[in-house]
Image: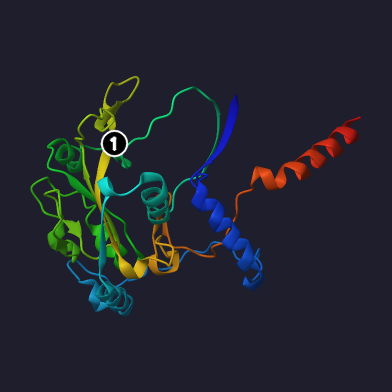
């Protein structure tokens, strides 16, 4: 059977309940503004310099105030993937690309441990990250928010492997629970990950080679999420991320980044509720074709 899925906001029980909640509250929302256009601005902290702490700016100080509400540590082995981990992770790992995918279904269902995937470009040389990941000591994935985007950006400097980018970032190290690598203390959402997981061959580092030159251009990492650290002030009453407080940054093309502008809800249709109306629409379309 052919199938079309909108990847990025997958269908699940929580999205249905969220849709009902959204429909009940739309009367209080302003209409979508079609006259708002994309504009380029300065970065959040244009005067940022090497090793500057985020508390040197007003937005940074406000961000650090939220940490006083504490942290929630989530052991992924003790939580249900579908009802607990999945809704939390898709609310925190944002923004995500959306794709309309056409596929043909196959038989068989699997239930895998929570997984995180990302790719490391190896141009002009192999990056430190895939090399360190393969060493097996674990790593952390830390989501970047607006108040410390400059701090995080400088860590991408093309320094030699022996140079520690932490020293010029101005960011603080926080100890992890399971892996050796520290997490970024300023990040409101961090994942402790490891490449090895007993009984699951899925987790691995895959080198992607150019079809003509044979050069390794990218390394794709598929890793097991062992623990999740999330700041309490970044969560809403349903236990998922409050996007307005989270302030995630989007990586765009070239050297462009963006924050969140207008945010709108788009509830998913429910077949049992829309089946009759769908039939009516199809009948009307058939009559028009005749």
Q: Which residue sits at x=57%, y=59%?
A: 265
Q: Is residue 14 visible?
A: yes
Q: Which residue is mark 1?
A: 222
Q: Nearer the viewer, residue 288 or 261?
A: 288
Side of 89 relative to 186 (left or right): right
The image quadrant that residue 281 belongs to is: top right
Q: Nearer the viewer, residue 268 or 29?
A: 268
Residue 123 in the image: above or below residue 246: above
The image quadrant that residue 234 belongs to is: bottom left
Q: Position of residue 177 (x, y in %)?
A: 15, 54
Q: Which residue sits at x=29%, y=31%?
A: 217
Residue farthest toward the bottom in the current orientation of the protein: 58
The image quadrant that residue 144 belongs to is: bottom left
Q: Position of residue 166 (x, y in %)?
A: 15, 59
Residue 133 in the image: above or below residue 252: above
The C terminus: image quadrant? top right
């Amino acid at each position: 059977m052919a199938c079309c899925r909108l990847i990025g906001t997958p269908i699940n029980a929580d999205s249905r309940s969220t849709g009902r909640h959204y429909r009940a509250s739309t009367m209080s929302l302003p209409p979508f503004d079609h006259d708002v256009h994309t504009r380029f601005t300065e970065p959040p902290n244009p005067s940022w310099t090497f090793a500057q702490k985020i508390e040197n700016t007003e937005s940074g100080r406000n961000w650090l105030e939220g940490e006083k509400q504490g942290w929630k540590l989530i052991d992924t082995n003790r939580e249900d993937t579908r009802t607990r981990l999945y809704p939390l992770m898709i609310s925190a790992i944002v923004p995500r690309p959306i794709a309309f995918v056409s596929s043909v279904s196959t038989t068989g269902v699997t239930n895998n441990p929570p997984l995180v995937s990302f790719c490391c470009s190896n141009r002009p040389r192999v990056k430190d990250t895939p090399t360190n990941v393969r060493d097996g000591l674990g790593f952390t994935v830390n989501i970047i928010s607006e108040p410390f985007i400059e701090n995080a950006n400088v860590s991408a400097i093309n320094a030699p492997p022996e140079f520690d980018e932490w020293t010029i970032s101005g960011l603080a190290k926080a100890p992890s629970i399971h892996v050796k690598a520290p997490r970024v203390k300023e990040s409101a959402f961090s994942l402790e990950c490891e490449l090895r997981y007993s009984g699951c061959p899925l987790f691995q580092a895959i080198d992607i080679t150019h079809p003509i030159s044979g050069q390794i251009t990218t390394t794709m990492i598929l890793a097991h999420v062992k623990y999740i650290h999330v700041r309490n002030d970044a969560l809403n009453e349903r236990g998922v991320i409050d996007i307005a407080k989270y302030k995630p940054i989007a990586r765009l093309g070239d050297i462009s980044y963006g924050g969140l502008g207008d945010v709108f809800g788009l509830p998913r249709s429910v077949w049992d509720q829309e089946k009759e109306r769908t039939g009516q629409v199809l009948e009307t379309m058939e009559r028009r074709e005749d």
